[in-house]
Each structure stands twice: as C-alpha cells, then as structure tokens.
Image (tube, rainbow, N blue to C red):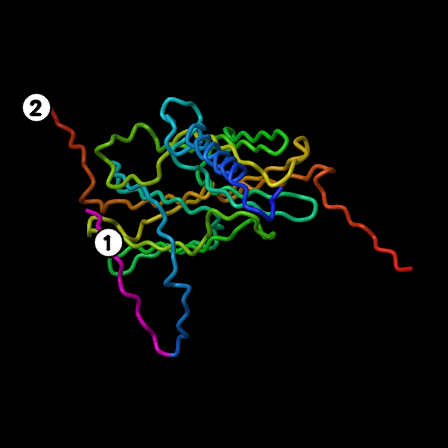
Amino acid sequence: MTSFFWEPIQGLEAIRREMDQLLQQFDSPRGRYARSAFLPGVSARAYPLINIGEDKDNVYVEALAPGLNPETIEVTVLRDQLRIAGEKTAINPDIKAEAFHRSERGAGKFTRVIALPTEVEGDKVKAEYKNGLLLLTLPKHAEAKPKQIAVKVS
Amino acid sequence: MMKETTVPANTEKNVPDTREETRTLTPPVDIFETENGLVVVADLPGVEKEKIDVNVEKNILTLKATPKHQLDKEIAGREYQLLPFFRQFQLSDAVDQSKISAEMKYGVLTIHLPKVAEQQPRKIAVNVAQ
C-alpha cells in the first residue's frame, strides 16, 4: 500500500479515516463526552477496577469489589465480551444521614463490560469471590489457543 | 469527635528501614454514630482476616492490613495494584478502648467503638407519684 513516492490523495484518505475513528469515539456510549447520564448501566467511572492475566489456556480477571452481596454478582460472557454486574451492599438504611461522620465507601449497583484479549468458552467460566476480590478463570476458546508447531530437524 | 491524624512512626534503632511502610493505600471508610458508640467501616479488598492489625495506643486507632492479589499469573492489563493499607484516627475519651471489637466480611472491616458507660444515653424511668 505504501508507495515509495509521495501520494497526496492516499495520505488524505488516511487522515480522513483517522478523523472518522476519533469522532466515533466521542459518539460511542463509552466515550468521555457521551450523554452517559441517560443511558442505563453505563457508569461515569469504571467500576470495578480490573486486572487481566493470561496464560496458555486461560484468561484471568481479578476485580476489586469489596462488600458485594454475593447473590447479586452476575457474570456473563459472549465471545470476547465479559460483563460483570452486581450490587455493593449499603450500610443499614436505618442509620440517619446526620449520624455519619465520614462516608467515602459508596454503594449501589454497577455494570461493567470489558473486552477480553481472546475469545473464551462461556460455559466453562469459573468465578470465585473471596475477601472482596472477584477472580474469574475463563478458558480460552480452542481457536484462540496458540498452536505449538513441532520443528523437525532433518 | 473523631479526627484523622498521621502520627510519625517511632524510629527504632537497629531496625532496617524498608520502603514498605511508606507506600500505602488509604482505605475508604464510613464512620457513623449509633446509640452505643461509633462504627468504622473500611473497604479492605484482598485482605485475609489474619493480616489485619487494628490497635489503639494513646487514643489513636491504627488500622493496618496487608492485602494479597488472587491473580498470580502474568498480567496483561493492570488497573490497580494492592499495597498495604494504613489509616489512623484520633479517638476521643468518650470511646471505651477496652471494648473495641472488629469483624471482617467480604473484604469489608467493621470496627465497633463503644462509648464509655457515662456517655451512653440513660433512660430514666419517671415514677408518677400517686
């Protein structure tokens, strides 16, 4: 595609494509300036925070989510899209707002959708909630696994 | 009633200086008052029950905890890093320091700080003179 000679028309085309991509980012519901307040399930801040790990067979996701009600945790996987939803338990609602000296923890429902590095087997996902960390083990789809090619020495 | 402080740590002799203590996370807390005293609720994700150190010395409540990642594989994307948690609060004399209790559930620590008996509201029965 790239030519040795300067091709102004192709150069302009590339710039136009980049501009289109940039505008698309602003338009998308996940974009920074989107009207996120009107859309359900899209929070202004990514919650929970996530670390992604990977080895030959699995993708691992660790989510920082203390104080969840374990029954509300919902994990769904579609191809390479992982959705985590749940609710952080609020403090006993009988306590009046005046009684609070500090309120930094926050509570409520959340949803987060993440793109995984590869496609995974949705029906073999394991989830474990321990000490406020949610650990997901997502086996990679057979097609996404790296294939070892034996090199024959003749 | 409750003021947050950071007390300079005692520098002991012959104790090697490590950087661990200086790089800490401040856990978010909720503090509220009930009839019997104060309750401190702190988010401590990734902390085992045994790795929490809550102590009161000279009216200062110190909360220390060492978290551990559950993910020990090669990291492909990192949004957070768990460091030791550290936070201190100045207690008032109204807290009965011998009766402080704490519990841990789902990575959330709840510390109960009961008021001393004289500070608790006392219901006085009114007798009607016949």
Residue at image mark 2: B129
Residue B125: image x %, image y %? Answer: 16, 29
Name the residue nearer the viewer: B13 or A59: A59
Q: Is residue B12 magenta?
A: yes
**Residue A43 seen in this snapshot:** yes
Residue at the far right: name it: A154
Q: Which chain's residue wears label 2?
A: B
Percent position (x, y) of residue A9? 52, 36
Name the kind of residue labelled 1 in the image: Gln
Image position of B80 with respect to A8: above or below: below
Pointer 2: residues within 10 angstroms few (<14), some, or many (20+)? few
**Chain under numbered label 1:** B
Magenta part of the protein: which range?
B1-13
Tag 2, which secondary structure? loop
| Foreground disc of the pair 1, 2 | 1
- The quadrant the N terminus of chain A occupies is top right
Which residue is painted at 54% across and 45% down in the image?
Answer: A6
For the residues labelled 1 and 2, the Cα–Cα distance comes to: 46 Å
* Residue on which disc 1 sits: B90
Is residue B57 covered in magenta? no
